[in-house]
Image (cartoon, rainbow, N blue to C red):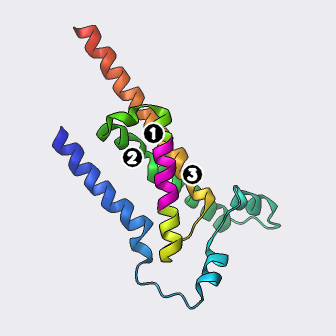
């Protein structure tokens, strides 16, 4: 079981690396770093929701793009939230898990900004953190249920 968990974690890690950095590798930006930051960064929470709701014409492609981005950012980090406490016992505490996850996601977003391999988006941080928390809660429910089952059978 441990080997399967390790293989799954490695595959997920490679996939996460590709989604966060790999897709942007080799892209050439025809602008200065300052112009890149201005055009590729969002420091305003819920900005995309505001844009969606205040848009005079809400079309299917706009809604689909919003949902794809929002749900994608949440779903992408659900496994992260389930795997982190599996591999690191101190992160079975929600407070520690939350702090480490927040700092990790913030660092990833910052690396994307500084390397121009993506954008820094506060909404991504919030949505990724939300997804990781869902994964953490699922992990806790699963392992709490297993512990209770082992106690009852003993």
Left-right relation of 149 to 132: left
Question: Which secondary structure, mark 3?
Answer: helix
Residue 67 shows in this picture:
no
First reached walking from the N terminus: tag 3 or tag 2: 2
First reached walking from the N terminus: tag 2 or tag 1: 2
Position of residue 59 measured from the top left corner of the image (x, y, whole percent): 71, 66
Check whether the beta carbons of the residues at disc 2 and disc 1 lie within 8 A of each other: no
On-image quarter of the N terminus: top left
Vertical arrangement, residue 61 with respect to residue 83, above or below? below
| Closer to the eye: label 1 or 3 | 1
Residue 145 shows in this picture:
yes
Position of residue 131 measured from the top left corner of the image (x, y, whole percent): 50, 46
Position of residue 56 measured from the top left corner of the image (x, y, whole percent): 83, 67
Residue at image x 43%, y 34%? 138
Position of residue 84 measured from the top left corner of the image (x, y, whole percent): 36, 43
In magenta, the rendered stretch is 99-107
Residue at image x 67%, y 63%? 43
Mark identifier at residue 97:
1
Question: Which secondary structure, mark 1?
Answer: helix
Q: Which residue is mark 3?
A: 127
């Amino acid at each position: 079981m441990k080997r399967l968990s390790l293989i799954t974690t490695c595959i997920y890690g490679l996939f996460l690396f590709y989604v966060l950095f790999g897709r942007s590798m080799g892209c050439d930006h025809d602008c200065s770093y300052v112009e890149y930051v201005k055009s590729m960064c969002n420091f305003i929470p819920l900005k995309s929701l505001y844009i969606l709701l205040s848009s005079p014409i809400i079309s299917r492609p706009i809604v689909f793009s919003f949902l794809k981005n929002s749900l994608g950012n949440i779903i992408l980090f659900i496994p992260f939230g389930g795997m982190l406490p599996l591999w690191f016992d101190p992160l079975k505490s929600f407070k520690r898990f939350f702090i480490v996850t927040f700092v990790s996601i913030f660092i990833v977003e910052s690396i994307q900004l500084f390397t121009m391999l993506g954008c820094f988006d506060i909404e991504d941080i919030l949505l990724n953190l939300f997804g990781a928390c869902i994964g953490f809660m699922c992990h806790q429910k699963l392992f709490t249920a297993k512990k209770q089952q082992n106690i009852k059978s003993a």
